[in-house]
Image (cartoon, rainbow, N blue to C red):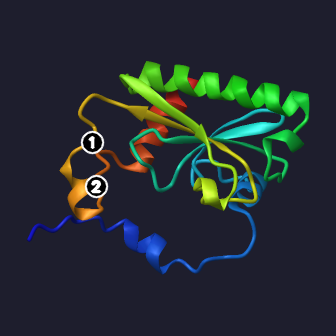
């Protein structure tokens, strides 16, 4: 049997699950690095996913709490997708992925982990970034610490 050592996961496992929406709470705080917020627009923000599929996995979310894309104003939607574009440009410049998965999961049935606050995932992909681990052992190996990815991306944003 092989063991994977991931001591940072214990913080998530033992952390009390609070009430409320993290996509509403985090941007109200002034702890952008601790909260992994990379960029703040007028209507939306970009943050690193704390439990990423791959290094550089970003989420774009509106400040306004809304479960549905259709509830957002035209200005919110326009900026939202401008930040999706900005995210792919940023990741391309810094991490140089071979491609991206970009998606919005609206509703629990669609796989939304935060189902009451819509957000878009931008996941950088590289040739060969999948292997036998997710298939055989339901385990994903992420090759870079969140803090290191945050510093690289934040430096590029200036």
Quarter assignment of residue 75: top right
Q: Position of residue 4 (x, y in %)?
A: 20, 64
Is 85 above or below relative to 24?
Answer: above
Residue drawn at x 36%, y 22% is 98
Residue drawn at the location 29% of the way across and 64% of the way down: 6
Res 63 visible: yes
Marks 2/1 in contact by CB < 8 Å: the verdict is yes
Residue in the foreground of this view, choosing between 144 and 1: 1
Q: Is residue 119 left or right of residue 33?
A: right
Q: Residues within 10 Å of mark 1 (few under 14, many from 20)?
A: few
The residue pinned by badge 2 equals 134
Q: Position of residue 42 (x, y in %)?
A: 83, 33
Q: Can you give x and y, in whole percent of width and height, for residue 158 in the image?
A: 59, 25
The answer for how far apart the CA atoms under marks 2 and 1 are is 8 Å
Residue 158 appears anywhere in the view = no
Relative to 66, is 11 on the left or the right?
Answer: left
- Circle 2 SS class: helix
The circle drawn on residue 130 is 1
Q: Quadrant of residue 5?
A: bottom left
Q: Which residue is farthest right?
A: 73
Residue at left offset 71%, top offset 27%: 81
Q: Secondary structure at mark 1?
A: loop
Q: Mark 2 packing: few (<14 Cα in 10 Å), some, or many (20+)?
A: few
Quarter holding the N terminus?
A: bottom left
Residue 119: which quarter of the image? top right
């Amino acid at each position: 049997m092989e063991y994977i050592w991931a001591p940072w996961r214990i913080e998530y496992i033992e952390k009390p699950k609070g009430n409320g929406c993290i996509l509403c709470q985090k941007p109200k705080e002034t702890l952008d690095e601790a909260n992994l917020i990379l960029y703040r627009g007028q209507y939306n923000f970009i943050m690193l996913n704390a439990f990423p599929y791959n290094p550089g996995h970003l989420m774009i979310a509106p400040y306004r709490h809304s479960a549905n894309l259709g509830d957002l104003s035209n200005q919110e939607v326009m900026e939202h997708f401008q930040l999706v574009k900005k995210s792919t440009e940023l990741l391309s410049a810094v991490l140089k992925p071979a491609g991206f998965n970009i998606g919005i999961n609206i509703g629990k049935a669609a796989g939304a982990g935060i189902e009451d606050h819509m957000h878009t995932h931008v996941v950088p992909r590289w040739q060969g970034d999948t292997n036998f681990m997710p298939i055989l052992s339901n385990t994903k190996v992420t090759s870079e610490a969140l803090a290191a990815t945050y510093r690289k991306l934040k430096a590029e944003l200036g």
